[in-house]
Image (spheres, rainbow, N blue to C red):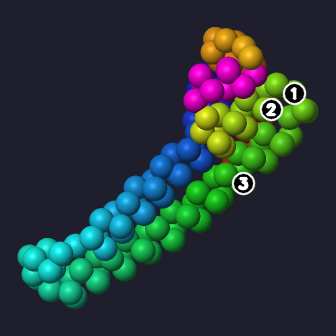
Amino acid sequence: MDVEKDKFMKSYIKAKSNERALKKALIDMDNFTLQDLYRAKGTEMYMIKKEGLQEKLKKQREECYLAKKKVLTAISKLPMCPERCVLYVYYIKNISWYRIAKALNITERKAYKIRAAGLEMIELPKTN
């Protein structure tokens, strides 16, 4: 399997995971108690930290969107085939190998092989 292509294809999964982590951090901040605010030296530090997280989340959402767009573009260049389907559900929908195999009525090993064949067909975008 081509490691470079796999890393490129996983860029969306990684970006989405980072986005979820930032969302969780913001939710955790909203669950602060008055004692937490006092320990954080008042609302000013709390607001500064929250605004920083919101800005990071905004940038992460943009990165996530761009990564998804690049991966979808690469997948969409493949002809309609099992490889295209497997790459889409694995890298975009983040579906487990078990569920992919069950949906296609194949073994997980066969699903891995289909993905490997799909990665061979994928063309990485040109970098400037």
- Which stretch is magenta? 96-104
Q: Residues within 10 Å of mark 3 (few under 14, many from 20)?
A: few
Residue 85, x across and y down, in percent: 78, 32
Q: Nearer the viewer, residue 125 or 78?
A: 78
Quarter of the image where one finds residue 94: top right
Residue at 46% in and 67% down: 57
Label 1 environment density (alpha carbons within 10 Å; few <14, some 14–19, many ≥20): few
- Residue 29: name its quadrant: bottom left
Task: Identify which amino acid the numbered label 1 is placed on.
Answer: Cys
Q: Quadrant of residue 110?
A: top right
Residue on which disc 3 sits: 69
The residues tagged by marks 3 and 1 sit, at their Cα atoms, a distance apart of: 20 Å
Residue at 30% across, 65% down: 28
User: Circle 2 is placed at which residue position?
Assistant: 84
Q: Main secondary structure of the magenta part?
A: helix
Q: Nearer the viewer, residue 3 or 9?
A: 9
